[in-house]
Image (tube, grey):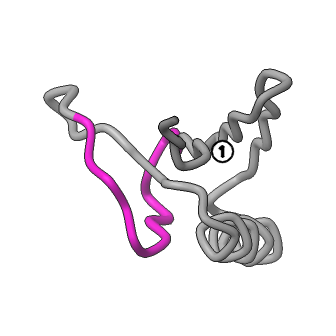
Amino acid sequence: MATQIVMDYNGDTRHTFDANDAKALLKAEQRFKELTGAGFIAATRTPSGEPIVRHTFDPTAEETLFFPRLVGG
């Protein structure tokens, strides 16, 4: 099972989906587009553990973390 973790000011929400299920995969891709379109940053990890910012949906990612843009002040 793959997981999309959405961080916000109240904590996090986790959405799991089966990457082999076409309907679940479509829903995960739509969620990715909605969140990144709303200004969230998406990140995954490489096999060596290095973080990578994602601008497109990666159906093979085991875990994708979404976090809101940081605002300085």
Q: Which quadrant holds residue 11?
A: top right
Which amino acid does the dot numbered 1 rest on?
Gln
Q: Nearer the viewer, residue 47 or 43?
A: 43
**65 to the left or right of 51:** right
Residue 32, given in percent of the width and then of the height, sits at: 64, 67
**16 to the left or right of 41:** right
Residue 37, given in percent of the width and then of the height, sits at: 64, 76
Residue found at x 14% / y 28%: 48
Residue found at x 69% / y 69%: 38
Q: Residue 62 in magenta?
A: yes
Residue located beneath label 1 in the image: 4
Q: Residue 57 in magenta?
A: yes
Q: Nearer the viewer, residue 18 or 47?
A: 47
Q: Nearer the viewer, residue 72 or 17?
A: 72
- Looking at the image, residue 60 lies above or below residue 63: below
Disc 1 crowd, CA 10 A, few/some/many (<14, 14-19, 20+)? many
The magenta-colored residue range is: 51-64
Q: Secondary structure at mark 1?
A: strand
